[in-house]
Image (cartoon, rainbow, N blue to C red):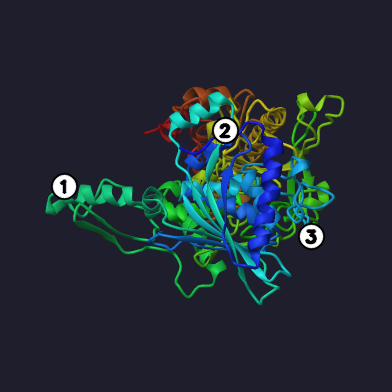
Amino acid sequence: MSQEIPENRPHLKYQETENLIKDINDKLKKGEVTEAALSTDEKVLARVTDGIYRQPASALRELISNAYDADAENVEIQTDVPRFSNMIIRDDGNGMSVESLTNLIYHIGGSVKNNSSRRVTGITDNQDVTRSPIKKRKLIGKIGIGLFSVAQLTREFTIVTKQRNTDYYLIADVFLNNYSEQQLDEYEKRGSSFETGQVKIRTEHTENTLAHGTDIILKNIKKSARDQLKSVEVWMQESSIESDEPTTTKTKTLVDTPSFHIGCSHNIDDSEIFRDPSIPWSDNDEPKDKFAKLYSSIVQRAATTVAPRLETDLDNYLNMIWTLSLSVPIDYIEIHPFLLTGNDYPSVYKISNLPKGKAEEIILLPNESISEKFSLKTPVTSTGFNVRIDGIQLFRPIKFSNIPSTHAAVKKPILFIGSANPDLSKISKTDSGGDLAFEAYILWCPRVIPREHNGVILRIHNASGVLFDSNFMKYQVAEHVIKGQLTIEIFVRQGLDSALNIDRESFNISHPHYQIITRWLHEALRQVIGKYKEIKRSVTSSNKDEKNATFSGNLDRIVKDVSIIVKKDIDDIIPVNISEDNVQFNNDNSGTLFIKKSDFSSWSESSKSRSISIQYTEQKTRAIIQVLGLFDLLDNLTQQRQSELFQAIVKVLSTEE
């Protein structure tokens, strides 16, 4: 069992940090190894070594976040696909100094951006600890937690880091401890901190003083993580079913295998499961083209399936790539939504922040962007941050043009824009959580592709540990059809980060900021649903009028053609008026033939609820009467016989299947 660290921690940790820095510096030029114990700042953070993160993607996401915070422009990840035995995460960021690495060792889980007493030169901006030192990026990670999230993948890894203008690499071999639940409980009862592992630190001389960045080398990846990335469970189920089926039925299995996957080569119980890969790109494609083809392949699946789903269309490895592309602060695959102009969306709708407000239509000029029109402050320029995994460059997989349509009445996407910056100055920070500012778009489209993009995603400084929430932060109003056609991104510029739970994949829903955003979203959804219904009614009415006009025009053309055949003038066509007036037969100066509307309704066999069907029956009846008139077949009929004839025609035309 690891030794318990004395409870008088603040002074002792400061002294330990200073001693370790001195020891490393003394041994730096000698090439000797310094050994130290890893320890947490708070007892609960030691649970990080037992894997609080749920998926391999979570661990890689945190390492990518650390690279972003370190001002990296490029992150290159090699997963050793399809074996996944070892992984390398390499960035060209600022690298770590002896001081910053030592700070990390003794403050696992500590956040330099929240505690000024732990500031270490080079980790954050000297004037603003919430920003990176060179590019002044808003920090998105949590120092320490991100690094040790790799416990999900392995308990043995190496950090190779170097700062610019130094002549050595700083190398730390890290070994994380395993803790049983009982051991953790014992430490917590005593209220003490404890060791989470050991580290051996050494240096290696280099002539390349300009090099900078950090490599994280993950060794001996856990079998559970390897099997998950290989999608072994899916292939085992398929193989098991195939082996149990008679030879004549092996052409079809009951397991939905992924449409796109990296294949499988797995041995179990002296038998091998082998599947050739099915990926939508070729090895010769450029990194950015590979991801574009992955995205396109999912969209194209919409032609053969009702709702493409990442869960079934991609294996676990490709799913991980897609998940990371949604999480980390990278560029959109096409364009940031706030850079869309009037050429893309001639009009958008502004979400009102007034009580019981309504979404208002806003007209955009052809080259006027949404960001300009609404004076939005969310950064829309390129992030200057590139992430590549096994030669695939990631982009945020959300597009706002060429969205697949359906046969629904409303065919074009509808975009809603909203923002909020509530004045919380009169409320104590304890109750308000501090300042809060965010901007958002709500996209309605006929089909959300893939299905997992249906919902709302919260981005703090353009990054997210949480994917789309299909429950829309527990929005209770039914409207399931409309809700199933919405994609929402909320960009939080200020606040909310303190509501993130330790795993960064969930929120403290009782936090004031989370509650404010929830109320805003639910009010916005009310406006969106109301406006969509209004638009749909207008489109439906317009379509009905257009269809009715086309149908009526076709009937008029047929009647006119008949008049030509029987060699009569157009003026000879009898005007037929189905109205509420009393029935009159050719006894007015216009020669119009009137049919009482109430009589017509009583004759009709159509369902009373099918107004369109009744309307078409009226038009057909009118055309038939006009044709009969052109053939002079009404002249010798009494009014009574005409009425009986019209009634028979209406009954025949309105009879339904």
Q: Nearer the viewer, residue 70 or 255?
A: 70
Marks 2, 3: nearer the viewer:
2
| Residue sitting farthest toward the right | 426
Q: Which residue is mark 2?
A: 44
| Callouts 2 and 1 close, C-beta under 8 Å | no
Marks 1, 3: nearer the viewer:
1
Instruction: Tell me the CA gap for discs 2 and 3.
Output: 52 Å
Q: Nearer the viewer, residue 232 or 352?
A: 232
* Figure quadrant of residue 586: top right
Left or right of 255 in this view: 412:
right
Q: Which residue is mark 1?
A: 244
Q: Which residue is mark 3?
A: 367
Seen in the picture, residue 217 relative to 630 is either above or below; the reply is: below
Instruction: Tell me the CA gap for discs 2 and 1.
Output: 48 Å
Q: Position of residue 205 (x, y in %)?
A: 62, 72
| Callouts 1 and 3 close, C-beta under 8 Å | no
| Callouts 2 and 3 close, C-beta under 8 Å | no
Looking at the image, tell me whether mark 2 or mark 1 is earlier in sequence order.
2
Residue 560 in view: no
Q: Quadrant of the C terminus?
A: top left
